[in-house]
């Protein structure tokens, strides 16, 4: 968002030794430590951070095939500092399926488990095997299995109960050689139909995702934004039924447990906030995707948060549904 205060100290680490060195350096000075990737999902408070920010730049990529049939499984160990989209590109070029729908998500591989990144029907938890972390409580490197990550929709233990405790150094994914399995997310399916593609390859799904994303999302290099600013609300089926009586077109995706997910973008648009630009605050919703907030001249994170609160309030008054912020507010 190009907003927020300054960090007292910042360093890059390229391997586990450098990470340990940086942690020791901060400990000797009694400074708090924060690990980040590329910073694409962070709102920095204006007050800044009186500690050490460690940018993870640990690079590594190794495939370990299991089995040798046509649909064989491949384990891939990936350094946390690898550029995520380059990883997706690489796996797709090797004919592997499992993460192709996560194309063009900005950031590093190591950040993907933090909010269980997801898009177009895939989530990182679907293919993640385990994560190597440095546990700041014990000072040890340990491996956390997928089942112990506390994954949920756009969340994990790394974002909730264990926020800030683990520094992720490596992730292991399990991908399949072969074709992606339908059904595909509706936006991808219509792209495939429009382009006469049946039985798509991982590469064709990646192209469909890139084309779809580029058509509606601003490039963060050119337009300051942090992707979807709000998560899609998950509400009880009974609450959905009440809303549906007034808004028969309100889409929903059942998520089990008597709950459904509804699109935050639809709520914001229906509340008349698509392309809404508050010139005083200097923040606007993106006209092609109102879930995305863009910095159009704001100078402080406070302005962004005031704009956020405005959107939450207007949507709540209209639908009695509370929107929740997706990017993290740090420190
Ligand atoms: C244009 C745009 C589109 C986006 N689209 C999507 C999308 O479709 N789906 C989706 O899920 N997200 C999306 N995002 C959000 C973002 O890309 C992801 O959350 C991504 O994983 C962030 O990676 P990062 O390296 O920039 O993490 P950062 O923003 O640097 O960090 C995010 C959080 O993870 C922690 N963290 C990062 N790396 C580590 C590590 N190695 N160890 C421990 N903690 C760590 C940080 O402390 C912070 O809490 C989008 C963002 C933008 C700007």
Image (spheres, rainbow, N blue to C red):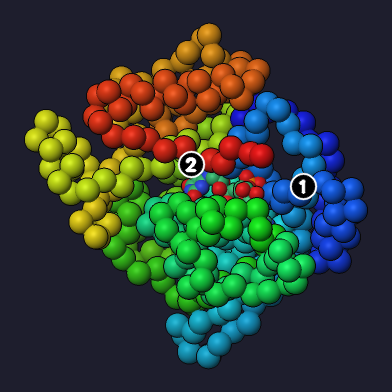
Instruction: Tell me the residue that label 1 is attached to.
Output: 32
The residue under the point 48% across, 64% down is 150
Q: Is residue 51 above or below residue 314?
A: below
Q: Quadrant of the N terminus?
A: top right
Q: Which mark is residue 85?
A: none
Across and down, in percent, residue 294 comes to 53, 26
Q: Quadrant of the C terminus?
A: top right
The answer to whether residue 79 is seen in the rendering is no
Q: Is residue 316 above or below residue 65?
A: above
Left or right of residue 279: residue 244: left
Q: Secondary structure at mark 2?
A: loop
The answer to whether residue 246 is seen in the rendering is yes
The residue under the point 50% across, 20% down is 306
Tell which of 152 and 228 is nearer to you.
152
Looking at mark 2, is its residue's CB closer than 8 Å to ligand 1?
A: yes
Across and down, in percent, residue 93 comes to 58, 66
Say which quarter of the image contains residue 19: bottom right
Across and down, in percent, residue 317 comes to 27, 23
Tell which of 320 and 128 is nearer to you.
320
The residue under the point 87% across, 58% down is 24
Whole-number angstrom distance, CA of label 1 to CA of label 2 = 24 Å
Left or right of residue 100: residue 85: right
Q: Nearer the viewer, mark 1 or mark 2?
A: 1
Left or right of residue 317: residue 66: right
Q: Which mark is residue 326?
A: 2
Say which quarter of the image contains residue 129: bottom right
Q: Is residue 296 above or below residue 225?
A: above
Counting residues from the N terminus, which is met first, the one under dot 1 or under dot 2? Answer: 1
Residue density around tag 2, few if under 14, some if 14–19, many if 20 or more, within 10 Å: some
Say which quarter of the image contains residue 80: bottom right
The residue under the point 24% across, 29% down is 319
Residue density around tag 1, few if under 14, some if 14–19, many if 20 or more, within 10 Å: some
């Amino acid at each position: 968002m190009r907003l927020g205060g300054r960090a007292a100290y910042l360093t890059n680490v390229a391997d586990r030794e450098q990470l340990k060195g940086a942690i020791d350096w901060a400990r000797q000075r009694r400074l708090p430590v924060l690990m980040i990737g590329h910073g694409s999902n962070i709102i920095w408070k204006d007050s800044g951070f009186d500690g050490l920010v460690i940018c993870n730049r640990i690079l590594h990529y190794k495939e370990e095939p299991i089995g040798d049939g046509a649909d064989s499984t491949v384990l891939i160990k990936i350094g946390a500092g690898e550029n995520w989209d380059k990883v997706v590109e690489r796996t797709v070029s090797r004919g592997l399926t499992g993460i192709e729908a996560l194309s063009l998500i900005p950031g590093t591989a190591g950040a993907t488990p933090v909010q269980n990144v997801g898009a177009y029907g895939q989530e990182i938890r679907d293919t993640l095997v385990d994560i190597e972390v440095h546990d700041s409580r014990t000072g040890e490197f340990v491996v956390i299995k997928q089942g112990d990550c506390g994954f949920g929709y756009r969340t994990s233990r790394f974002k909730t109960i264990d926020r800030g405790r683990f520094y992720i150094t490596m992730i292991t994914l399990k991908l399949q050689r072969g074709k992606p399995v339908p059904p595909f997310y509706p936006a991808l399916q219509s792209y495939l139909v429009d382009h006469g593609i049946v039985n798509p390859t991982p590469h064709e799904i990646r192209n469909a995702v890139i084309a779809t994303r580029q058509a509606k999302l601003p490039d963060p290099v050119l337009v300051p934004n942090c992707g979807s600013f709000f998560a899609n609300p998950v509400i009880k089926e009974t609450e959905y039924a009440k809303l549906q009586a007034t808004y028969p077109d309100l889409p929903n995706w059942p998520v089990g447990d008597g709950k459904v997910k509804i699109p935050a973008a639809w709520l914001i648009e229906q509340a008349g906030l698509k392309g809404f630009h508050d010139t005083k605050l200097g923040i606007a919703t993106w006209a092609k995707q109102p879930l995305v907030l863009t910095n159009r001249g704001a100078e402080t994170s406070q302005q962004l948060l005031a704009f956020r609160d405005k959107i939450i309030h207007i949507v709540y008054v209209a639908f009695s549904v509370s929107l929740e912020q997706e990017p993290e507010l740090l420190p």
